[in-house]
Amino acid sequence: MRISVSFGAAMASPFAVCRLKGRGILVKCLQKVDPFLHRNIGTDVVAARERHGCKSLYAVQAEGQEQAERSVLISCHSRTNEKKFLKYISRHGDIKKYFFYESYGLYAVVEFANRESVASLFEGAAIPSVSHESMVPFKSRLLSLRNIGLADSTNQQSGQQCQPQTPIPINELIQRLSKEESIDQQITSLTDVYQLTQENSRLRFLVCSLLKDIAAAYFPECTIKPFGSSVNGFGKLGCDLDMFLDLDGISGRNASMPKSGLSLEYQMKRASSERAVTQSILSVIGECVDQFGPGCVGVQKILNARCPLVRFAHQPSGFQCDLTANNRVAMKSTELLYLYGELDPRVRCLVFTVRCWARAHGITSSIPGAWITNFSLTVMLLFFLQRRSPPIIPTLDHLRDLAGPADKSVIEGNDCTFVSDFSKIQLQSNTETLEQLLCEFFEFYATFTFSRMSINIRKGKEQNKPEVAPLHIQNPFETSLNVSKNVNATQLDRFVALCQESSWLLQQSETNAPRGGNKEKASKPWGLATLLLPSQVAGIKSRKKRKREPASERIKSLLESLKNTNQQQKS
């Protein structure tokens, strides 16, 4: 479902409209809201948290939200000429940033220098004349441009370059890594390929802003923010978009006693709990998204989950979206992971590498089940870095001890306090390379006593398990919870077996030495590329069956084959 707009003075109208399609009425009349409402959020806090060009998460979110409010998403003809397009759109104001991408067609994200340009764009938008369909005048910044004058002829190339929105295939990644000259370069290259681009991040903030326009009909000062992988620095191209409906910033909500004697009459019926309130809010917003959300399809209201949410696909962006409310602990977890990633560049590089390795071998999965999750894997990596000598990153308890009064945060009885001022964090000097750390990570968990010990990044040391579970990773903030409770013994055994083999492979000269290939020609897989080959884990089911074998017959055969290949190349 998409707003269809024509540009031109002859059909000027103050409204753009949604078409009614699909099974029954998919859109109904919605109160017009001002999509350009802007609030300054924590300006003083943002300024205080900047250090040496390192932005705080608050600054990143504030900047992303402000850019999104000045942006529009336009569906274009597949042969749209870029120069003609820009000339046409720039009639409404200066364009600060734009890019094209493909998702069920060609789209353009256009960021204007000011929000008045978006209003001007709307003034040039007309209601399509379709006699057999009813129209709803709901203004959205998702537009359709169908002006034939902007398209090239069929025998001409349109010229615009589309930004990637998904990662490259694993086989192509392996070929790329095989051409690098060191394992450190391989790890860096993998991170560059997989991490979110600036354009993809802008698109995520824009989708949140488009959803905010809908929610603002009920909560005019609300915001919808991305959280999780979309902003914590560990997001991979193509990852889901987790969104948080934030009502805490509504003016006057936290005031104890109004000086004027006036208080707002909230139209919220009494509910038995805060959870019930959250469910009611998401139920209404979910229905609104389903009925009025342009491009939002497959809407599911999953309100009885531990964390109630609304799930849907946003077709114009290609994102799978989860919208939650009152999920403040998850926001603090996002902030903590972002902080750790900013403290040392090796953190992000290793997280991307280990996650890629895990997905290549089926240790993690996009399907819910007994697999280790990306979050659990990330916590395990952070714990390993805390255990280095000297430690690469501090413990959560240490970050809490450095916190100031403004950092104090207690959510539902859980202590979520940690320092936000980067300048207060003094790191120890650890000069280990990425290659050393990756090999040591595999060795660390290949010999970790999972049967007795728990992983705890708050303390930064192993602790006795408080419950019977194959894998116990303490939730950093809700400390009574095990974030890996879903993992069964079979999956943990596979993880340990893979760690054993990967550690062993990285120590072998036959797989650890560059193949001498160049950037233009294909090279034999080596180093990290070897670890990503699916055949490396064929037949592994349990570490019990493997005992303490230094290597399987299959790996010995592989190494023998590599030796023979090298000898043939030399001869």
Image: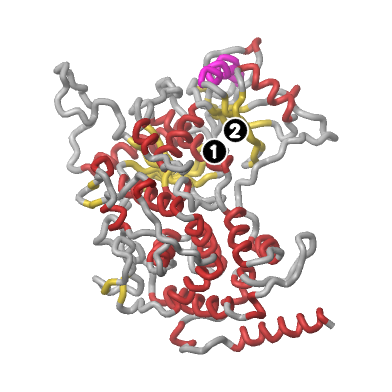
| Quadrant showing the C terminus | bottom right
Classify 489 as above or below 188: below
Classify 38 as above or below 191: above
Classify 435 as above or below 285: below
Please state which of residues 494 and 194 is positioned toward the viewer in this rendering: 194
Q: Is residue 562 left or right of residue 17?
A: right
Asked if labels 1 and 2 touch by Cβ distance under 8 angstroms, the answer is: yes
Q: Is residue 558 left or right of residue 136?
A: right
Kind of residue at badge 1 = Leu
Identify the element where label 2 is drawn. strand
Question: What residue sits right under mark 1 in the picture?
Answer: 203
Please state which of residues 205 and 21 is positioned toward the viewer in this rendering: 205
Q: Position of residue 133 (x, y in %)?
A: 56, 24
Q: At x 28% / y 48%, what residue is drawn?
A: 403
Q: Is residue 556 left or right of residue 256?
A: right
Q: Residues within 10 Å of mark 1 (few under 14, many from 20)?
A: many
Identify the element where label 1 is drawn. helix
Question: What residue sits right under mark 2 in the picture?
Answer: 109
Q: At x 45% / y 39%, what residue is drawn?
A: 60
Q: Position of residue 437 (x, y in %)?
A: 50, 68
Q: Residues within 10 Å of mark 2 (few under 14, many from 20)?
A: many
Q: CA distance from mark 2 to mark 1?
A: 7 Å
Q: Quadrant of residue 481?
A: bottom left
Of the two numbered discs 2 and 1 on the same chain, state the one appearing first in sequence: 2
Magenta range: 115-130
Q: Position of residue 509 (x, y in %)?
A: 64, 80
Q: Quadrant of residue 258?
A: top left
Determine if the magenta segment contains residue 125: yes
Q: Is residue 347 left or right of residue 155?
A: left
